[in-house]
Amino acid sequence: MGNEPIVYINPLIRWAVHPADTGRIAYIEGIAGPQVLPVENEVIVRPFLVDPLTRQPVPVRVVEVQKRWDSSRNGDNLVVVVAREQ
């Protein structure tokens, strides 16, 4: 016990920028990316997480993955909090 995979019900992945990086990462609505849930401390690049000036994707580090149950949609909300990779 303890190594069983986590099962999510009807998951929805949402993205948030860590407060320390507000203004250093822009989120572009409507651009799809891989629906693979990253793990904490992983460095990833997504087409919708971009540099605010160049609008080019930037490497970000996953700071935290928050799991929240949403009873209004009968599913899990997974909030991936990211910070700019230095």
Image (cartoon, helix red, strand yellow):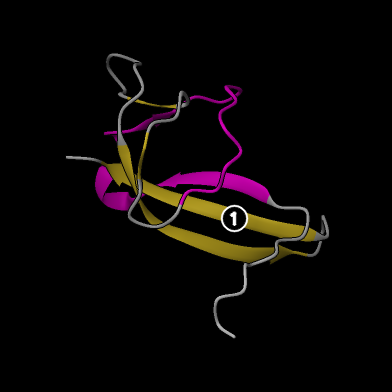
> What is the quadrant of the C terminus in the image?
top left
**Which residue reaches farthest top?**
54
In the image, the segment drawn in magenta is: 12-38
Element under disc 1: strand
Q: Quadrant of residue 41?
A: bottom left
**Which residue reaches farthest bottom?**
1
Q: Is residue 18 magenta?
A: yes
Left or right for 35, reference 24: right
Q: Label 1: how many residues lie within 10 Å, few (<14), some (14-19) or many (20+)?
A: some
Q: Which residue is mark 1?
A: 78
Q: Residue 24: image x %, image y %? A: 26, 34
User: At 33% across and 33% down in the image, what residue appears?
Assistant: 25
- Residue 45 drawn above or below residue 41: above
Count of numbered labels shown in the rendering:
1
- Residue 16 drawn above or below residue 46: below
Q: Amino acid at mark 1?
A: Leu
Q: Residue 54: image x %, image y %? A: 28, 13
User: At 48% across and 48% down in the image, what residue appears?
Assistant: 38
Q: Nearer the viewer, residue 66 or 35?
A: 35
Q: Is residue 24 magenta?
A: yes
Left or right for 71, reference 13: right
Left or right for 4, reference 69: left
User: At 70% across and 65% down in the image, what residue appears?
Assistant: 7
- Residue 3 drawn above or below residue 22: below
Q: Quadrant of residue 1?
A: bottom right
- Residue 51 drawn above or below residue 64: above
Q: Residue 61: image x %, image y %? A: 31, 46
Q: Residue 67: image x %, image y %? A: 58, 64
User: At 27% across and 43% down in the image, what residue appears?
Assistant: 21
Left or right for 41, reference 39: left
Q: Quadrant of residue 45?
A: top left
Q: Nearer the viewer, residue 13 or 3?
A: 3
